[in-house]
Structure formats: structure tokens, C-alpha cells
Image: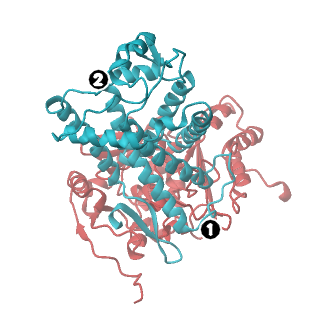
Chain colours: A cyan, B red
Amino acid sequence: MGGLVQMARSPWGQDVPIHIAWFLIYVCAIGGLAFLMVHAVYVRYFAKQEEFSGTVNPRLAAAVPERVKRHSFAARAFHWIMAAAMLTLLVTAFLPKVGVQFNWVPIHWIAGLVLTASIIFHIIHASFFMDFWAIWPNKEDLEEGANRMKRALGQDAPAPRRFAKYPLENKMYHGIIVLAGLAVICTGIFMLFRIRTGILPRNPYLFGDMTWGLMYVLHGLAGVGLIGLVIVHIYFAMRPEKFVLTKSMAFGTLPKEYYLSHYDTERWKVVESSMSQGAGD
Amino acid sequence: MAVIRDVMPAFDLLQPTSADEAQKLLQQHGHDAWVLAGGLDSFDWLKDRIKKPRVVVDLSGVDELRGIRAMSDGGVEIGAMTTLTEVVTNPTIKQKFALLSQGAELAASPQIRNQGTLGGNVSQDARCHYYRAGWPCYRAGGNICYADTPTGRNREHAILDANRCVAVNPSDSAPALIALDAKFVIKTSKGDKVVDAEDYFIGPDIDITRLNILRPGELLTAIRIPATWANAQFFFEKVRDRNVWDFALMNVASAMKVSGGTIQDARIAVNGAAARPLRLKAVEDAVKGKPNNAATGEMAGKLAVQGAMPLQFNAYKIPLMRNLVKRSIGGVEVAAWAV
């Protein structure tokens, strides 16, 4: 761990971590960019045409509206507020470390509070007003994912079913973002005790040097991880075949054709068998 | 094994003979290089083994960085390696820009002024005892300010513009140069750049590990004082624990153009209140057009300390700053108790 973490000798002679090694900023940024380049080349030259098993029930298909509701206004507002806060946090955290200097601390902690508030809202909203389990991988996702991977590698495997509301990769990305996001938020809230915010009483002795150091390291690791994650997220949002999903995050709906060609009407029900409107978010 | 603290760690000593060569060496070695001017700040760091540069670039052989030259506009250009004694004794500076000679004369002791340079005085590092002891504080790249804790000793520290770190800038010549509207000439790999004196210094909000804008590979070569404030009405006062020689608890420098008892224009700066010498623009604006008397000074003093936030042991700096600014505008009055 030595090279990844900056250590220092505390006044009491204890070697304590103080923060991550800042070269990890470049590692994560370059890693994110490398991933998108490799993926772009793969999609352009090697990827096979998407193929799904099963057919769409014509009666259900006929009942699907021209625009399929995918994200409620509240969900979209959360997404964009969170995105703005996240980008602000990354810019204010890491630009000063690479030589662009400005008064970043107040902007950073205020953006952190906005992110925290938006995440709390999202947890409540997703728990009580949305299909909470829709974003978490289940056994079927894992089996389908394994089959898709085999087919991508040229092995024999049955064609996968169409997706539920969120494909496995979305669910996995969400899970990683949850981990990284909660890590920066939990550590960041405690770090507010170290600066003058006017909100929390300043108390730099809340923890010992070792605990504080580990907290700064975790905050940094999650932070640089988010650099790569955000690069990958923006890349997929900008890809032509995914851009329809990005638009749905702005306007809330998907075209009927896209829904029917990519999503399983049973796994993501926008109309019930009785033709009633299903539970969107 | 005992830690030897009176012998410097090994480093490569580079001794350029021109400013260009010095800048190129600094550029070549980047973060590994240390600039050695008079050595009064440097040798503390090196002998205490707190800073361990791989390369020391000694400027003592660069003659072009020395001397005081007249400029065509009536101002002067002072080489960064000019000693404080030369600044203090220079006839032109004494005659036209006495504010600087007053400030420089109050720095340290005669021996130190013989060796210390103007460039070194404005570029010296913070004197916070926690930082100088090598503790891993914010300024040293860590994540805490030991001075700004419930038990921290912070009598000499900042009351304004603190941002995590509460150290102050220790320079005596810096506020005088700001009040004189001096320009700092910095040699970079892309050529010379000239910045206003007040912009040479930065606080922890911008960069918590430096007190000035010099980046690795950059070299302060000269300080130019324009004729704008020549022979203005000057005031410099430094308050310190020991009048024999000591760093300032706080100092103030003002230059005023007064006509018919009315302040036409003014520049005022204090040091020891924040991590960088503060130019008091609000005070300058407030006193313009006002008589230079005790009442204006009183008003200026109150305005100067607005927003001040004392730490546990430095609340005295608020009335100190208020009174220094008051005196810099209204003049030194006889204390009421002495009347």
C-alpha cells in the first residue's frame, strides 16, 4: 500500500497515512480514457449485432404508448442535480492537485452537501416511491450476463432475453457508484469537522491521527475512482446507440420502438396484461 | 540512534552565474530544487532536516540579481539578491521611498540584514512553530492545522483569511512594497512576467503549501518600485515581542498623498494578520477625500478589522491591527494615559 498512500510521521512518532498518492488521479483518468478507447474499438470492429431470444406479444405491443415513460421528473431532477454536484466535486478536488489553483474548499464542501442531500432524497424516493429492487442485480441478470459474455467471446450460449428496465451493466455501475458515493459522503461529512463551515462545530480532535488519515485515504480513493466512473458514464451517455437513453434522462420517455426492441415487456411492464399502466418510476 | 539536527542533509550544490542559467537549473530540477538566496530561511530548514531538497541552486554568484538601479520613470529596480542593508542605506530609496527603507530596517538584526536579501525577505516561508518543527500539517502536505486546535498555541497566527492553515506571512518589507505599488519580476521558461506586489503573495485558499506564486522553475529576479508614490507621506510600524530583533506580530505600511489636510489617495497594507500581506482596499477607498486626522484613522482602524476571527490566543491582534491602521492614517498620537 506504501506507494498508493502518502504517509507522515505524527508529532507522537507514529507513522500515519495522510492522503492518497496524487499520481492516482492520473491513473484513474487514464484508466477511464483507456477503457472508452478499447470499448469504442471493440464496438466498431469486433462486436456482433445485438440478438435477443423470444418475441414480443403483439397484443401487448399494440398497447404500448408511443412514448414509454422511463424516468419520473423527480428521478430526472435527482440525476442532474447529483451529476452537477459530482462534477463540481471532482473539479474542485482534483484541479488544484494538477496545478489549477483557486479557492476550492468552500465550493467543494457546499457541492458535497448538495450531493448528500440529493442522495438522501434518492434513497427515500427509491425506497418508498419506486421499484426499489429494479436496480439491483438478481439471479436472472447474472445468468443472462454470463450468456452474453460467452456469446461475445464466440462461445455457444443461448441468446439472452430482452432486458428488464435496467440491464446488468447499469445495475453493476449503480452498485459501484453507490459504494464510491457513500464512501466519499460518509468520510466527507466527518471531514467537515476539520474546516470552518459555520454548520458543524470545528473539532479536529474528533478522531485520532490514524483514523483521520484512513478517512482521508478512503475519501481520496473513492474520489479518484469516481473520476474513472464518471468518464465511463459520460462516454456511454454520448454513444450513438445509447443516446436515446440519455435523452430519456432529460425528457423522461423512450420511443416505443426502442422499448419493444430492447426490453422484455414482462420484465419491465409498462402495460399490464389487462392493459393497465404499469409501475414506472 | 539519535537524529543529527545540526548537519545538513546531502544535496547537489549548483552555482549558476547568470539569471538565465539559474532559471534553467530550476526548470530542469523542478520540485527537487531549492533556491538559496541569503540562506537565512533556507539553512533553518536544511539543518533541521525538515526540507531535504536534492538540489540547491545558490544564487550568490549571480551578480545581475544584485544592485539598485534607477528606472527611466523615476522609480527604482532592486535586484532580488540585494541585501536588506543595501536597501536600507541606498540614498535614492531613503529619499524617495523611505517606506521601504523603514520596513527593511526593522527586519531582524544588522547581521541578518547584511546577509538577508530583499527577494528572500519577501519569499521566506511561514514561521509557524508547528510547521517549522516538521509536523505533518496542511502547509507541509498533511491534513490538519496543529495551531488551530483547542489546545494549539496560536498567539502569532492569523485573524483574517484563515483557510485550514492559520500561519501568517513574516515579511517586513512586503507590506511596504505593496503600499509602494511595487512590481515583482519573475523569470520563467516562457520569459519574464511582472506581477503586482499584492498578487505575488497567496493565501491557503489558493495554495496551502506556498506563501507566494513562485512555481518550480520560476525565479524572482527583481522588484520595481514605480515613481507613482515617490515622496508620498509614509508610515511604517512594526510590533514585536522583543524590540532587539524579532519577527513581527503585526506591521503596517501606508503611503498617502495628502493635499491641504485631505487624503487624495492612499495605499495601506498590513502583515502578520493573514497568510499573505493584506492590502486594505476598503480602508483606502474609505479614507480618500477625508482629512488625515485621528477621526479618519479611528474609522479606518475599525473598518480594517471587520471580519477578523481570532483564535484562542491571538484576540489581542484585533485591537493591535485596529490601532496600527489608525496610526497609519491619523498619525501617532500621544497616548491618552500619558497626557
Q: Is residue A73 above or below residue B43?
A: above
Percent x, y of residue B302: 74, 42
Q: Quadrant of the C terminus of chain A?
A: top right
**Of A196 and A30, the residue lying toward us:** A30
Question: Residue, x 20% and y 31% (percent of image)?
Answer: A43
Q: Quadrant of the N terminus of chain A?
A: bottom left
Percent x, y of residue A95: 40, 42
Percent x, y of residue B246: 57, 67
Q: Is residue B22 left or right of residue A281?
A: left
Q: In this figure, which residue is indicated by the disc labeled 2?
A: A241
Question: Residue, x 34% and y 22% (percent of image)?
Answer: A243
The secondary structure type at the circle numbered 1 is: loop
**Of B163 and B212, the residue lying toward us:** B163
Q: Can you tell which mark lies on residue B263?
A: none
Percent x, y of residue B142: 47, 61
Q: CA distance from mark 2 to mark 1?
A: 76 Å
Q: Is residue A273 above or below residue A12?
A: above
Q: Is any part of residue B75 visible from this angle?
A: no
Of all chains, the one bearing label 1 is: B
**Of A271 and A186, the residue lying toward us:** A271
Q: In this figure, which residue is indicated by the disc labeled 1?
A: B243
Tell me the quarter of the picture where residue B129 sits: bottom right
Q: Is residue A82 left or right of residue B184?
A: right
Of all chains, the one bearing label 2 is: A
The amino acid beneath tag 1 is Asn
